[in-house]
Image (cartoon, helix red, strand yellow):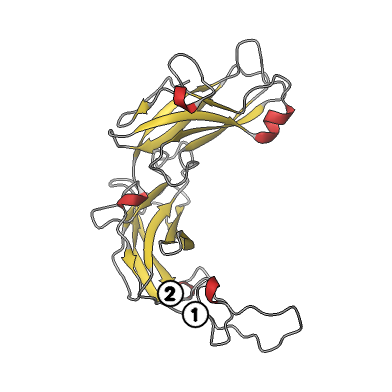
Amino acid sequence: SEDEAGSLYLPEGYYNTSGTQWRQESATLLPGADRSNVNLTLLTGSTISGTVSLPTGISAPDGGIYIDVYVYDTYRDNYYSNRTVFVPAGQNSANYTLAVPNDASASWQIFYFYYAEEGTNLEHCLREGYYSSTGTQWRDDLATPVQGGVDWSSINLTLLLGKTISGIASPPPGLPFDDGVDIDVCAVNDLVRYQWIYCDYIGVASDSAGEAYKVTVPQDAAVSWTVRYELDLQSTLDNPNNFLRTGYYSTRCTQWRSSLATPVQGGVDRSGID
């Protein structure tokens, strides 16, 4: 349920002879035969609540926006649940409430995920940011864990603004993409949990000399980025010119090995990264 009452129930529970459990490993396994009275009870738990805000001075565009707030279970090193928050047009923030198991041994990491449409006033926001007592962070290792077993409020998140890396993705001269291709252009770094998070997905037509891309990355001048392309698998199989599926930006020319890539320094907007 998307209403506030629905947010107070745990998103999943597992049958156990002693009662419904929140952890899958606590489930009672059943033999392959007809069974009755295998009952489940919706679980309630403790709550984590707060506000999701847009950057200072920015309001949601026409139609409003949806932002996902996630809970990451650091005990199991896995995603636990999420809640979709709606920020109405003209507003800067909205509240959220998440239910989590009432387990004092648990430790939760809270983060947002938002995919901005190009051309909106939010297109330069980072796709994810992690709750920290010192303010939202782009790195999960800088997050402040939220201890389980108690209710938490004021666990606030703010969408982070970033810097852009941009350029052109193009075929070699004289070797067009016969049927067109789909390309992911990504900025990657070992500090990022999900290597697909800072990517632009573009299509290059068969008669095109190249297509522009733009990737938004964190405003961290201490970090450098490896920029790579990756052809869609079907595009790779269908193309008769034997293009390599992956290539890395270098000031000399695109390279096939990541160790030959030229790092792109963060902290400022970068263009001409072709």
Type of amino acid under label 2: Pro
Report the amino acid beneath label 1: Leu
Contact, mark 1 vs mark 2 (Cβ under 8 Å): yes
Q: Is residue 95 visible?
A: no
Residue at image location 45% in from the left, 79% down from the top: 44
- Mark yes or no: residue 22 visible: yes
Q: Secondary structure at mark 2?
A: loop
* Identity of the residue drawn at 60% across and 18% down: 171
Q: Is residue 264 above or below residue 171?
A: below
149 and 9: which is toward the camera: 149
Q: How far separated are the C-alphas under marks 1 and 2? A: 8 Å
Q: In the image, 34: left or right of 59? A: right
Q: Position of residue 82 (x, y in %)?
A: 47, 62
Crowd tier of the residue under label 1, counting other residues whose Cα lies within 10 Å: few below 14, some 14–19, many 20 or above: some
Kindly identify which numbered label has been placed on residue 101. 2
SS state under label 1? loop
207 shown above or below 76 = above
Image coordinates of residue 210 in percent, x first then y, are 57, 20
- As rendered, which of 128 and 148 lies closer to the eye? 148
Residue at point 54%, 23% (across, down): 256
Q: Could you tell whether 237 is left or right of 90 in the image?
A: right
Q: Name the residue carrying label 1.
A: 43
For disc 2, the neighbor class at 10 Å (few under 14, some 14 to 19, many from 20) is many
- The disc, 1 or 2, on the residue closer to the chain's N-terminal end is 1
Q: What residue is rendered at 41% in x and 39% in y? A: 190
Front residue of 169/242: it is 242
User: Along the horizontal axis of the image, is 172 left or right of 107?
Assistant: right
